[in-house]
Amino acid sequence: MAGFAEKIRLFVAADLGENAEIPLAREQAHYLSTVMRRQPGDRLRVFNGRDGEWVAEIVAADKRGGTLCLLSHARPQAAPPDVWLAFAPLKKARTDFVAEKACEMGCRRLIPVLTRYTNAERVNTARLGAHAIEAAEQCGLLNVPEVAAPQSLDAFLADLGPRQVMFCDESGAGAPAAAALKQAPPGPWAVLIGPEGGFSPEEAARLRAHPGSHAVSLGPRILRADTAAVAALTVWQTLLGDWERGPQDQGAPG
Amino acid sequence: MAGFAEKIRLFVAADLGENAEIPLAREQAHYLSTVMRRQPGDRLRVFNGRDGEWVAEIVAADKRGGTLCLLSHARPQAAPPDVWLAFAPLKKARTDFVAEKACEMGCRRLIPVLTRYTNAERVNTARLGAHAIEAAEQCGLLNVPEVAAPQSLDAFLADLGPRQVMFCDESGAGAPAAAALKQAPPGPWAVLIGPEGGFSPEEAARLRAHPGSHAVSLGPRILRADTAAVAALTVWQTLLGDWERGPQDQGAPG
């Protein structure tokens, strides 16, 4: 039972260390006690994005709240490569998918960027964060991307500083992504995925004029935004990120 | 109005040619007349995966059925690279996503493969086909992957013939995907994505022993199956497929 229970992984906010007592959020306590029927003494794993992964034991948990006690350090914290994912928000379900893909693909930051043809008025960043956390919990990941507040394209470009940015140019003017990145500098990067309607001509011109910007194409077929995010990050991780490393280097989950 | 209406694209079964009359399926006629409020004389685009894309005019459409008349040939048929996507079926929503990703990523065939740890008993291939068609309609694609009946891993391997197969090996024994494919032969390929629990040790051994099989890893983080499908196909299309071509080569949709 204890071994089976360790398959549960929870993201917590608290600092993690030897013998620390960790308070459970109400919904986590409910999940453990009512949904998964775990009891005091059962084990699970916890992580917070800073202190690696720990084996924890349930001290108490019911539907109103609970406490864990940390038993042992299971995996050291890994630092993913420094890449951000910025995207024009979409319909709700696809935006949720982008958030989980950003997490699985090892992004440090997820940024909703409002463009001229963006087809969404409001962005629920708490919901995006919850989807990223769920992906991290289920995929054995140690990092959860920070979800930034929605910002304009101008504000996004101003925040980049010297960071390189790769944007997907549906006009066909961009170089194939792999060819473009082969000659590109390493260091901090961002991947920017435009809205369904593409960037406006003014936006595309502003992007091309931005220092450190790289217009790329992702093949001859038009991809939906969530697909384009995974494809662009795959090329980036392969050529400039950490995909030359095998799965064991992140530490397999329990 | 007519120009706007051309943004609608429908996949049809009939052969397409000059002045052909095309019967509408009941749900397509309902979609055009009731959902999109189109009327006789309005235009749209149709494709069937064989005869390219055509501009069509509505002759008649109400919620029970309708007819189109073809006006002009808009784009020639493109043949995507010869790659299949095989995957162990997942929960319903994720399986739907795999079907649409297979289409966007230019696969010719989508094959549900039942493995030892596959977490789904039934596969609705009609539903998979509908999701692939919807992706093709919305993304301006000319090809829809054929959806095969679910088959066992043994039957899948037997059907491959001389086709190369790349499978994602979560054990860490696989080479990074880009490195593995750089030295791999061109020609027909398949990408095989395992179930959430991975392949059983016997299945992994059988896969490794199969002639023309390539065990690959997709980075240090564990990916969900739909993410892994897009990532693996991105590497394949980049190194052995058609991603060196820009978006204009497939012909931009109207």
Image: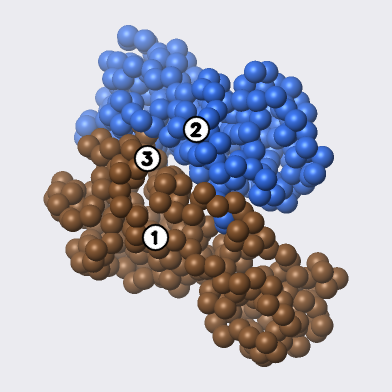
Chain colours: A blue, B brown
Left or right, A229 with respect to B72, comes to: left
Report crowding for label 3: few under 14, some 14 to 19, many 20 or more residues within 10 A (C-alpha).
Answer: many
Q: Which residue is mark 3?
A: B178
Residue B4 locus on image (x, y percent): 81, 67
Looking at the image, is B54 positioned above or below residue A229? Answer: below
| Mark closer to the chain start, 3 or 1 | 1
Respond whether the residues carrying marks 2 and 1 are from the same subunit.
no
Q: Which residue is mark 1?
A: B83
The quadrant in which the N terminus of chain A is found is: top left
Residue drawn at the location 38% of the way across and 55% of the way down: B90
**3 or 2: mark nearer the eye:** 2
Task: Pick whichever, A18 or A192, lies toward us.
Answer: A192
Q: CA distance from mark 2 to mark 1?
A: 25 Å
**Amino acid found under the numbered disc labelled 1:** Val
**Amino acid found under the numbered disc labelled 2:** Lys
Residue A147 in sight in this render: no
Number of the label disc, if any, that sits on residue A182: 2
Task: Pick whichever, A235 or B186, lies toward us.
Answer: B186
Q: CA distance from mark 3 to mark 1?
A: 16 Å
Q: Are marks 3 and 1 in contact (CB under 8 Å)?
A: no
Residue B215, located in which quarter of the rendered image? top left
Circle 3 SS class: helix
Residue A72 locus on image (x, y percent): 27, 15
Report crowding for label 1: few under 14, some 14 to 19, many 20 or more residues within 10 A (C-alpha).
Answer: many
Q: Chain of mark 1?
A: B
Q: CA distance from mark 3 to mark 2?
A: 13 Å
Residue drawn at the location 31% of the way across and 32% of the way down: A247
